[in-house]
Structure formats: structure tokens, C-alpha cells
Image: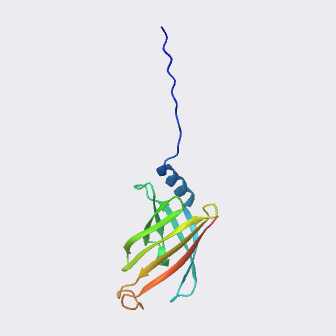
Amino acid sequence: MCLFMTGFISCVPDEENSASDIRSQLTGTWQCEEHSESYEPNPYNVEISADATSSSGIFITNFFSLGSSVIASAAVIGSDVTIPVQILPGGFKISGSGFVSEGNSRIDLQYTVQETPAVINAKTGSTESVTAVYTKNN
């Protein structure tokens, strides 16, 4: 007597793998152009790296042009980017959101930056609404 067993294997990408794939395409140096009511357009570079402890997390070094030692965290799920509320060195409270587009070579962000009185030339507790466009450097 012979037994025949038939099995089916399906490969369906899960959300975690999709997030990992896009994060690998986002790592590297990006040109940032920010616009806000109080500041002139200020182009500068940021560095994006993947957070090894999270399936969707990324780190943005030099966020808001605060220097190479300032790192903001964000999450990327699909093409959506979320910057959770966090306080960066120097007392900058940030949060925001955005999206990745143009074949993962552009990130559009809108975020708020609340400056504390400890920051030189900052109004007490002033909040900036910032629009930023990150363009991938080759």
C-alpha cells in the first residue's frame, strides 16, 4: 500500500518583510529642504539608518539640522512615515508624519518642533510647523 501526500507551500510576503525591504532602500544620505514660517529654506543632509531592534523603525541623524549627534526615531510601514512624540537633545520636542514616494527616492514630511526656553534665540515654548522634503543622494 502506498500513501501519497500532496502539500502546498505558499509564499506570501508579510508586513514585517515589506517594512524591512523599504527600510533597506531608505538607508543612506538624503538632502533635506525644510520650510517653516520662522526660518528661511535650509538645505542640509540627513542620514537614515534602520533600527535593528524594530521591524519598521528608522533613525534620522541630523534631524532639523541639529547636528550629527542628534538622532530622531521614526517608523515606516508601507509608504507611511510616523515620527512619534520625542524630545531630542537640546529640548526640542518633535512629532509628525509623511510618506515615501517616487520609487523610494523622496520622503515628504510634516512635523512640529517645539522649542524650549533653553534653546538660544527661541521664544518660550514656541512651536514651528515644518514641511520637509528629503531627496535621496546617489
Query: Height in image: 10 above or below 123?
Result: above
Q: How many marks?
A: 0
Quarter of the image with the C terminus in it: bottom right
Q: Position of residue 49 (x, y in %)?
A: 49, 61
Q: Splitting the image into 4 quarters, where does residue 33 fall?
A: bottom right
Residue in front for this viewpoint, 117 or 2: 2
Residue in front for this viewpoint, 72 or 29: 72
Q: Position of residue 56 (x, y in %)?
A: 45, 57
At horizontal 51% and vertical 17% (from top left) the residue drawn is 4
Q: Hey, which residue is sitting farthest top in the picture?
A: 1
Q: What scheme was used to colour the molecule?
A: rainbow
Query: Height in image: 36 above or below 59?
Result: below
At horizontal 46% and vertical 84% (from top left) the residue drawn is 128
Residue in front for this viewpoint, 112 or 88: 112
At horizontal 41% and vertical 76% (from top left) the residue drawn is 94
Q: Position of residue 50 (x, y in %)?
A: 47, 59
Q: Position of residue 55 (x, y in %)?
A: 44, 54
Query: Height in image: 24 above or below 72?
Result: above
Q: Splitting the image into 4 quarters, where does residue 112 fall?
A: bottom left
